[in-house]
Image (spheres, rainbow, N blue to C red):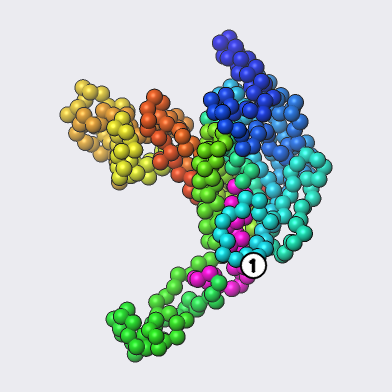
Amino acid sequence: MFTRMKSAVANFMGGMMAGSSNVDHFGGSDLPLKYPYTRPEFLGLSPDEIECSADHISRPILILKETKRLPWATGYAEVINAGKSLLNEDQACCEVVVVRRRPNAGGNSTPNLTPTTRRRSSLPNGEGLGLREDADAVPGLTFHYWGLFDGHAGSGAAVVASKLLQHHIVEHLREVLDVLRNPAQLVPIIHGEEPTNHNLTPTTHRGITRTASLRGAAGAPGSPSHPPSTRFFTEKKVHHESLVMGAIENAFKEMDAQIERDKAVFNVSGGCTALCALFLLRKLYVGNAGDSRAIIIRGGEVIPMSTEFTPESERQRLQFLAYMQPHLLGGEFTHLEFPRRVQRKEVGKRMLYRDFTMSGWAYKTIEDDDLKFPLIYGEGKKARVLATIGVTRGLGDHELKVHDSNIYIKPFLSCCPEVEYGQSLPSDSVRTRGG
């Protein structure tokens, strides 16, 4: 009975909040929203339908009204939680984007968040299947983009990331557009220069000793009398796929930095995990920062394309950070892991423990400092960092603190994604993403 009453109250409040453009203002912020709360644009929901979607009792399953609205016969379904939050804090995005060289591109490296790209509009106005193209369009690279953002502690970060992450990816792809458009050519070490021969060997310079080469002697590579284009040392070969991976990685970092900047002038609540997929140049790239999953089902075989980042899977990274910067623990936590909470009566006894250098377990003599709450506590879905959050990577959460303390959790939360890529996919493959 109590559970039903709680759900009814949450449903009533959720309906009120869904009908308001100031949905995140209940958190106490007087700042305006950067983007109003909504559901994914490709669902084409009316304001009344958005309000009904927040019903915590009936929990309607939302699906696409038009199955051909999204490319590649993309399907989508969502349902609100059973009352954990007033609104559905998750977001999604699906677009077709064309990356083009920036007009009058000079030395301007400042990201433009309204880039000159060609995008598939997902607005519910009947024009969603067309491509908008700028008048000054030039040939570019087309990629398909899907994004899932699992929000928590508010919907603000997920909404902003769903609107802007693809723009940051575009900006970084634009920087290497000329290189990507020529896959048969080697990736140049210095941008704008002709790629060098990676197969040079020291036998080219038999008459020059290694010491002389390092000192820049006459006739040695790099000396004034030697052609500057020749290299004595072998250069690392970088593949074109690595440029796309680097663009995705840098885009995640810039998205997180923008959310932090926006918090000074907008109400951007909470944080979110982020999972995006790009199909570019006949390859599928998946970037994941969080605990969402992406898989490919091919001929009945399940192929993982992402890894879950949880307090347990990233234990050693978190422990090492706390070991190197103990002030981040605020004197309230210990970076060591124990099978359970240490009791005062166990001081002086030997208990199992695990440090950042260890995959296994060992015994140590318990000291007073070990009585502090562990940095990572719990197991499985109940594992938490600093007794607060169950994910270790994502966007936002810049103001998140341990309850009733001044200990920030953000230093332990990485915005850096793990990026995987696969070769061209057969038509019978099914790509699945879940938050």
For this orientation, the residue located farthest to the left is 348
Residue depicted at x 63% and y 15%: 8
Q: Is residue 168 magenta?
A: yes
The picture places residue 392, in percent across and down from the top left corner, at 45, 39
- Whether residue 66 is in magenta: the answer is no
At 58% from the left edge and 61% from the top edge, which residue is drawn? 108
When asked about the image quadrant of residue 183, the answer is bottom right
Q: How many marks?
A: 1
- In the rendered image of this protein, does residue 119 appear above or below residue 79? below
The answer to whether 273 appears left or right of 333 in the picture is right
Task: Give the percent coordinates (x, y) of residue 216.
Answer: 34, 82
**Residue placed at 71% from the left, 39% from the top?**
41
Q: The N terminus lies in which quarter of the figure? A: top right
Evaluate whether residue 182 shows in this view.
Answer: yes
Q: Residue at x 50, y 71 (%)?
A: 190
Task: Give left or right: position of 138 versus 153.
Answer: right
The span shown in magenta is: 165-191
Residue 148 at least partly seen: no
Q: Quadrant of residue 323?
A: top left
Answer above or below: position of 115 versus 60.
below
CA neighbours of label 1 inside 10 A, class few (<14), some (14 to 19), many (20+): some
Residue 181 image offset from top left, x and y in percent = 64, 67
Give the residue pinned by disc 1.
181
Q: Nearer the viewer, residue 27 or 252?
A: 27
Q: 73 and 231: which one is in front?
A: 231
Under mark 1, the amino acid is: Arg
